[in-house]
Image: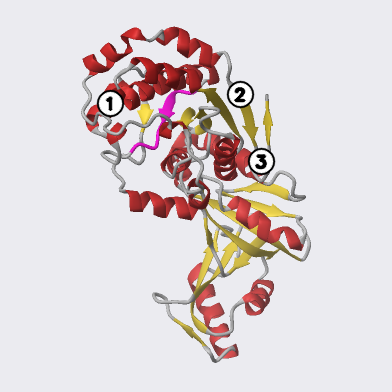
Amino acid sequence: MSQSENVILIRYGEIYLKGKNISFFENLLYSNIKYALKGIACKLERLRSRYAVSDYASDAEEEICVRVSRVFGIHSLSVARKIESARQSIIDTVMKISPKSGAFRVNVKRADKKFPVHSQPFSAEIGGLLSREYPELSVNLHEYDFEVNVDIRENGYTFVFTDKIAGPGGMPVGSAGGGALMLSGGIDSPVAGYMMAKRGLKLCAVHFHSFPYTGNDAKEKVKKLARILADYCGSICMIVVPFTKIQEEIHAKCDASFMITVMRRFMMRIACKIADIEGCGAIVTGESLGQVASQTLQSITVTTAVSTLPVFRPLIGMDKEEIIEKARKIGTFETSILPYDDCCTVFLPENPQTRPRLERAEYQERELAVDALVEEALNNLEYIHINPHSESGQTH
């Protein structure tokens, strides 16, 4: 170890509750951090209950912090000085990196019980030295502008830092299995995907495209949304479903008021089939109860009747303003409001059913070759592999 170097110290959140299974989550989180740092020259190492990024160029520090701060499972991170665990070295480093004005407190953690000074007296000593050296500093243990952290580790080195960058929390992506996200170009579904990925679900994205009624700009918009999600979730396989023929058949053979209901049932059937193919154990949607006609209790019941998998609806109890606030926070909102229609706006009826009954929806489908239409769509899927920190996707 060099005498002193900058490292990025990473702390995880609720993983610590996992008891005997903790190594599985720690290993997965390590892999996810490593993947997030792909393309940046650096070293990632595991410490006890945390990780550290080192050996990076100074101009890469900000990008590393941005990428790591989006990895689910991380509670917080800090740019820290890594030094030898010697009393005077620690004091000298604190005096150098500490702000020179404001209210502060000192927090010493002594994992190395061989270190000769205990945590509390060492905190008091450092606080007193700072106050005497810099008159514009004042100690306040409860209402402080910054905190000086001294983390004395077991292997002869210490981390010193003053700032903490919040991570997204949650669980490592992949720890909860896979989910097929029904990704439209709207505001809601990207937020739903983000929220389920935060709980450890590895996403594939299923997008229904109705060319030529919805053009290439609409598909590119959804690809951009998937790229934004990938910065949080890791790589995403976006699967584009040709939906034009199904919509035309529904328009020709079903009562106009039932078009949305029947369309949503087709989408659910296809999404479940794709989920089975991709090894996903659930469907994820952006539905919010009562927001639109297809999201009333009755509509959701009729749509879910054709599902063969659990359907996760993380936004179900949120209002639109809450969803928009979340979309702004994760960076999808500005893309979601671009004026390119998705397939849900094609052949939109004036008076859609808000309280459909299952038997009436099934009656509407009697003239449709449901299985054949689903099979034809599945035979013509387009696969686009979306990678994080990339402006393009690989299509096949």
Residue drawn at (29%, 14%), measured in percent from left and top? Answer: 364
Q: Could you tell me how far apart the alpha carbons at marks 1 and 3 are, in whole angstroms? A: 47 Å
Q: Is residue 46 left or right of residue 101?
A: right
Q: Is residue 376 left or right of residue 95?
A: left
Which residue range is magenta in the image? 280-287
Q: Is residue 157 left or right of residue 215?
A: right
Residue drawn at (45%, 42%), measured in percent from left and top? Answer: 186
**Mark 1 or mark 3, which is nearer to you?**
1
Q: Earlier in the sequence, mark 1 or mark 2?
A: 1
Q: Could you tell me how far apart the alpha carbons at marks 2 and 3 are, in whole angstroms? A: 25 Å
Percent coordinates x, y for residue 74 in the rendering: 53, 49
Kindly check if marks 1 and 3 are in contact, taking CB atoms under 8 A apart as contact: no
| Vertical side of 136 occupied by 185: above or below | above
Q: Which residue is mark 1?
A: 257
Q: Which residue is mark 2?
A: 382
| Vertical side of 215 occupied by 39: above or below | below
| Vertical side of 55 occupied by 199: above or below | above
